[in-house]
Image: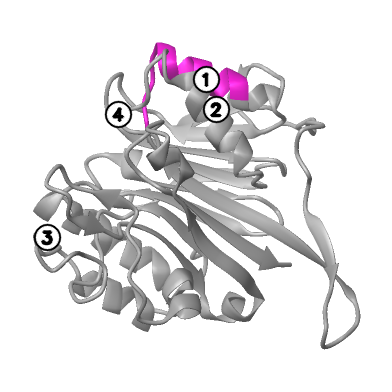
Amino acid sequence: MGFHRRGRGSACGSTGRRRDSARHRGPATRTDRRSGRAVTVHRVATLNIRHGGTAKRIPQLVAALRALDADALVVTEFRIGLAGNLLVAELASSGYELTHPDIAAAVNGVLIASKAHITVARPIGSALPDRRHLWAADLGWTSIAGVYMPQMKAKLPYWDALLDEAGGSAAPQILIGDFNTGDNMLDRDPGGAPFVGADRIGQLLRAGYTDAWRDKHGDAREYSWFSTTGNGFRVDHAYVREELEPRVIRCEYDHDPRLARATDHSAMILDLEV
């Protein structure tokens, strides 16, 4: 199954109520220019913390995650262990409710943290050999899937499971995380190695999802991770169901965590009217 923890609580096998932190702005409200009505804006963000972080890096990573000021977080390359336990405790103390798949120590997975109560958390792809790469959660106001794809051809069965999920009636409204994949024309430096599985992105778009960042920025180039040789790649993405696309206000990268060397990835921020 998986792990679930209440905000400011202890580990438990079922969901529970959370307590809000005074540090969090909560869902924002603004006036819609077309209708004149007040609308609620929720923020979803993702950050790859690089091999689970280390106990020494956790304070810097926690500060980076808190600075995103998100209603829901997807943390990729999360690991069980001392650093992971510290991260879970810090996020719980900030009022987040947390869930992640059962994973062995020292392997990368996905952690979902939510200010809203998590009603259901589940794996995607029941036939997959390893459930740590795709983890879905219902947050009440939306449903999300946290994604951490493996490298090279190892990612393809997980992409196929995600595509099967995308075609179903219970498909999450938001898919967000580190896909380790991109468009071979626009999402990598010309000198960088081509992506394996780039065709899966087109299949996902045809299944009814929109690339939220590309939709806002057209053919612009911006990278969320750089290789040791300096080639840039856009591998961290947010895809939203087509019916949700008109509600996307903002989708941007926050490069501060990477530039500060808290991790080797930039964060992604997605703001939506709900």
- Label 4: state its secondary structure: loop
Specify whether 67 is left or right of 226: right
x and y percent of residue 166 in the render? 41, 69
* Mark 4 or mark 1: whose residue is earlier in sequence: 4
| Residue contact at pointers 2 and 1, CB within 8 angstroms | yes
| Cα–Cα span, label 4 and label 1 | 15 Å
x and y percent of residue 55 in the render? 42, 13
Q: Which amino acid type is marked by label 1? A: Pro
Circle nearer the viewer, 3 or 4: 3
Q: Which amino acid type is marked by label 4? A: His
Q: What residue would you read off at disc 3? A: 192
Q: Is residue 192 magenta?
A: no
Give above or below for 44 relative to 8.
below
Q: What residue would you read off at disc 1? A: 59
Q: What residue would you read off at disc 4? A: 51
Q: Residue at x 49, y 65 (%)?
A: 171
Q: Which residues are magenta?
A: 78-90
* Mark 3 or mark 2: whose residue is earlier in sequence: 2
x and y percent of residue 82 in the render? 42, 11
**Main SS of the magenta segment?**
helix
Query: Which residue occupies the foreground of this view, 155 or 216?
Result: 216
| Cα–Cα span, label 3 and label 2 | 31 Å
Circle nearer the viewer, 4 or 1: 1
Give above or below for 71 relative to 84.
below
- Residue 201 lies in what quarter of the image? bottom left
